[in-house]
Image: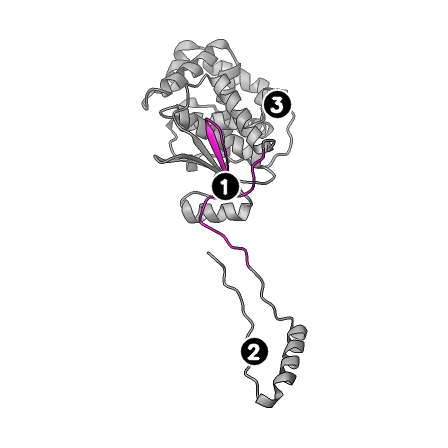
Amino acid sequence: MDAPHHQCQQQHPLAAYATLCLGLLFAVSLLSLGCRTTRSQTFSSERPQSHTWATDHFIVHSDDPLLPGDPLIQALQDVRNQLVSLLQLPAQRDLVHVYLFSDEASYRWYMQSTWRDLPPRRAYFVGTTRELAVYSFRGQHAAEDLRHEFSHGLLHASLQSVPLWLDEGLAEYFEISSSADTQLSPPHLQELTEARADGWNPGLYRLEQITDFRTLSQRDYAESWAWVHFLLHSTPESRQVLLDYLQTLATTRTPGKLLNKLEAAVPSWALDFENYTDQLIASAPFTASEPTAGQPPGTP
C-alpha cells in the first residue's frame, strides 16, 4: 500500500498579459518556499519472490540476488547438516521455504498484515497445510535467527509432531553456530544461574504440559535448552532416549511423554540433570547478548 504523497498547488494567474512574469515569479517562489514532493517508502503484502536459491531440502526466496557464497545460505546448509546428523532424523517429507526480506520494515509490514495474531519478533517459522515457511530479514542477527527458525522447519518437515518444549529446546540448541563449544548459550546459562538463586526446581513434567508458545517465559526457553543439552551430551543412555523419541515422533502424533521414557532408562535422571546444569553454569563465562528469535512475546 502506498503512503499518500503531499502535492503543491499553485493559484490561477491574476492577469493573462502577465503570463511570463508570473511564470518567473512562480519559479522563484518555489525555490524560496522549498516546495517539493518526496517519495514515501512503499510496502507490499507480497513475500519476496524475485530471486530463489533451491536445494533438495529448502528454497530461499529473496528480492535481492542470492549468490553461492552468501553466508546466510551457508548458515542454512550448515544447520541442516548438523541437525540431521546429530538427531538422526528420517528423510524430509516436505521442503522448507525461507522468505528473506531485504529490510526489517518490509518484513514487519508483511507479518503484521498477514499474521496479525503473532506477537512481533525478528523471525518466525509458520507451518500450515500448504507449506512450511520461515520468515526473516537481512540484518545483524539474521544468521542466528534463521538457524533457530529453520531448525523448527526441518523438524516439522521430518516428524509427524514435535512437543513444544522439545521444538523450542532443539531450536535454541541449533540456533548457536556449530563452531561454538558444545552449543553453550551464555544467555541461557545466565538465566539458569538466576533461577537457581530464586530456588528454581527444574520440571520436565511441567514443560511437557505447555502447548501455547505465547505462554513460554524466558526461563522456560532456557530450561528447554538445558534439557536438550543434557539429553544429547550427558550419557549415552540419555542420548538414546532422545533419539528413540524422535523416531517415534516420525511415525505418530501421540508419542506419549518423554519423561516416562527417561525415568525408565535413567532412574537417576533428576539428580543427573541437576549436576549437569551445575557443570554447564560453571563452564561458560556470561557475556551480553541480544535477544534471540525464539524469545518470549515483546522481543524486538
Would you call the spot at circle 2 few (<14 residues within 10 Å), some (14-19), or many (20 or more)? few
Residue 252 x %, y %:
32, 21
Q: Looking at the image, which residue is at 61% across and 31% down? A: 69
Quadrant for residue 177, please give it: top right
Q: Is residue 286 left or right of residue 94?
A: right
Q: Is residue 1 left or right of residue 36?
A: left
Say whether marks 1 and 3 touch (CB < 8 Å).
no
Q: Secondary structure at mark 2?
A: loop
What residue is shown with label 1?
A: 121
Residue 42 falls within the magenta-colored stretch: yes
Say whether marks 1 and 2 touch (CB < 8 Å).
no
What residue is shown with label 2?
A: 10
Q: Earlier in the sequence, mark 1 or mark 2?
A: 2
The amino acid type found where label 2 is placed reads: Gln
Which range is magenta?
Answer: 40-67
The amino acid type found where label 1 is placed reads: Arg
Q: Nearer the viewer, residue 81 or 124?
A: 81
What residue is shown with label 3?
A: 179
Residue 119 x %, y %:
45, 43
Residue 152 x %, y %:
45, 29
Q: Earlier in the sequence, mark 1 or mark 3?
A: 1
Residue 106 x %, y %:
51, 48
**Is residue 148 among the parts visible in the rendering?**
yes
Position of the C terminus, as image quadrant, is: top right
Q: Nearer the viewer, residue 243 or 224?
A: 243
Query: Between marks 1 and 2, how big is the CA–CA gap?
Result: 46 Å
